[in-house]
Image (cartoon, coloured by chain):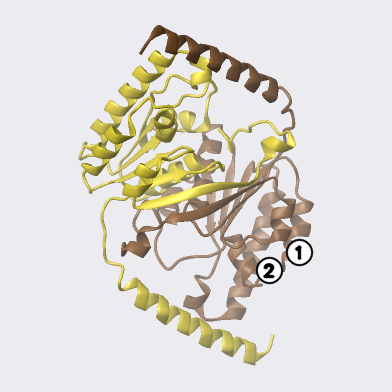
Chain colours: A brown, B yellow
Amino acid sequence: MTDDLNSRHKQRMARIQKARERIQATKTLERGLLIVHTGDGKGKSSAAFGMALRSAGWGMRVAIVQFVKGSWETGEKHFFRDHPEFASFEVMGEGFTWDTQDRERDIAAARAAWARSLALIHDPAIDYVVLDELNIVIGYDYLPIGEVVAALQARPLTKHICITGRGGKPELLEIADLVTEFREVKHPYKAGFKAQRGVEY
Amino acid sequence: MTDDLNSRHKQRMARIQKARERIQATKTLERGLLIVHTGDGKGKSSAAFGMALRSAGWGMRVAIVQFVKGSWETGEKHFFRDHPEFASFEVMGEGFTWDTQDRERDIAAARAAWARSLALIHDPAIDYVVLDELNIVIGYDYLPIGEVVAALQARPLTKHICITGRGGKPELLEIADLVTEFREVKHPYKAGFKAQRGVEY
């Protein structure tokens, strides 16, 4: 490496730094964000849990509601059961709908989970609320999208809310502040791998 | 809701359940996965930390190396500093390259972080290794992609490894088992919001 290369690098990076500082000075808004993680790729719930960990690192109070309960045990369930100091964690779904095969029971469970979610959203003691797989139960029409959107529009702007699940409805994305699509590029399941601990549950 | 609708729902769900069971029976492979989170969207590191939380929930041992150190404090740094029982957490980067403006120092830092990463990858006591923002330092040519790929191909298959950062190189995606692209649909930064605690750091 020549001194010339280093010197050009230093000049270019100084320019980038100045430009970044100029842009950042214009970013002044601050309030609770409505976040949606959607798409067919993996990581939607993991990323919501990672933000729970970040929030806990700042001493923020976190509440998680899972709208769909898999039949299996999960790492996140074990973690929050053993460490309730980091987040309240409630599994309120009645299992995947092909496991229960009972539409009315699924709807009742979704309705109960939604009522609990609204209580948490309006609880001033909570700083971050995760509504895990809410998109799934909306997709099955277990909760009307219009009702969910109206309630979220009336939310207090003092906390972050993260909604996960594939198939996030356009009406929800429309009112969200931050939307990420998780796009599947390569999935081990298709290569014959089982779902694995730590990664998928 | 009519009984007829419920009954058709039950039949359809029973068919889906059978189909799922048939497919799942063919998924028998199990070994450590090489995972890459790339793309311009938010959540790549959060999802890696969420898997750390899941892994900790299963009693798996986790190690995290951060290749790029922002100038700010982060929730994840606070969390793991206060709770080293969940993961070893090492910030080894020298800051964003436009902050250091010193290419040789950045390369030396990347090299040291990579040496530490290899030690963790080959440590039989570790079950899950996060190489946070490794894609960034590869993108700057601070580490040669060929060397990284060769080392990862020689990895022990007993643990999961997750590499994050935008601009994941095709050579890396080629050897990975699970690749998710995080696609930005809507970003609060562009609407004038500051980066916010719990969400972005």
Q: Does A190 sit left or right of B122 as displayed?
A: right
Q: Quadrant of the C terminus of chain A?
A: bottom left
Task: Name the spot of residue B142 as percent of width and height, x first.
Answer: 38, 24
Provide residue A157's location: percent of width, then percent of height. 75, 42
Separation (CA) of disc 2 from disc 1 = 8 Å
SS for callout 2: loop
**Above or below: residue A187 compared with residue B66:** below
Badge 2, how many Cα within 10 Å: few under 14, some, many 20+? some
In depth, the one of A164 and A121 nearer the eye is A164
Pinpoint residue A9: horizontal percent, then vertical percent.
48, 15
Tags 2 and 1 touching, CB below 8 Å: yes
Q: Quadrant of residue A5?
A: top left
Q: Which residue is mark 1?
A: A147
Q: Residue at x 39, y 44 (%)?
A: B170
Dot 2 and dot 1 within a common chain: yes
Horizontally, is A104 left or right of A87 in the view? Answer: right
For the residue marked with disc 2, what is the amino acid?
Leu
Residue toward you, B175 or B30: B175
Which residue was labeled with disc 2? A143
- Residue drawn 65% across the image and 20% down it: A19
Q: Is residue A141 visible?
A: yes
Image vertical order of residue B35 relative to residue A195, above or below: above
From the top left corner, tell me how far across and down residue A190 is, in percent: 37, 64
Q: Is residue A189 above or below residue A178?
A: below
Whether residue A194 is visible to the viewer of this picture, yes or no, is: no
